[in-house]
């Protein structure tokens, strides 16, 4: 795809959509507190636990993977996701 004004606009829209989805995941994990949530609970709660044949749950799992790479969330051995423990350098 050759870059132009339309593709630049489409790219910006897609990045905003990903940011909105990650913010929604963050919000539900914040509300869950230390109990955390499983991928299935996050995905179904947000209406994104769907996918093509044999790929159900990949949307929410991909978002969690992106957020994990950013250091925002973490998963325990029971496959429960929680917000990562953040340090506040200004405390």
Image: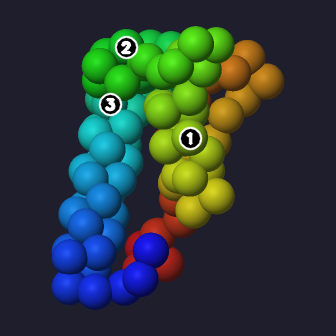
Of 90 and 35, which appears nearest the observer?
A: 35
Is residue 30 something one can see in this rendering? no
Seen in the image, is 83 located left or right of residue 54? left
Q: Secondary structure at mark 3?
A: helix
> How far apart in space, not on screen, are marks 1 and 3 (Cα)?
16 Å
User: Could you tell me if the residues under marks 1 and 3 are in contact, i.e. CB atoms within 8 Å?
Assistant: no
| Camera-side mark, 1 or 3 | 1
Of 25 and 10, which appears nearest the observer?
A: 10
In x, y percent, where is residue 20? 25, 51
Seen in the image, is 27 located left or right of residue 35? left
Q: Which mark is residue 44?
A: 2
Give the mark nearest the N terminus, 1 or 3.
3
Q: Which residue is at a point 49% across and 78% down the rendered structure image?
A: 89
| Residue under pointer 1 | 62
Q: Quadrant of the C terminus?
A: bottom left
Q: Which residue is at a point 29% across and 75% down the rendered structure image?
A: 7
Q: Which residue is at a point 64% across and 13% down the rendered structure image?
A: 54
């Amino acid at each position: 795809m050759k870059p132009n004004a339309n593709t630049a606009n489409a790219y910006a829209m897609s990045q905003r959509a990903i940011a909105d989805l990650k913010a929604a995941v963050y919000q539900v994990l914040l509300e869950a507190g230390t109990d955390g949530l499983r991928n299935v609970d996050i995905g179904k709660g947000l209406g994104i636990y769907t996918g093509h044949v044999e790929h159900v749950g990949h949307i929410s799992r991909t978002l969690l993977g992106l957020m994990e790479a950013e250091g925002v969330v973490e998963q325990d051995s029971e496959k429960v996701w929680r917000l990562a423990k953040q340090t506040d350098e200004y405390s």
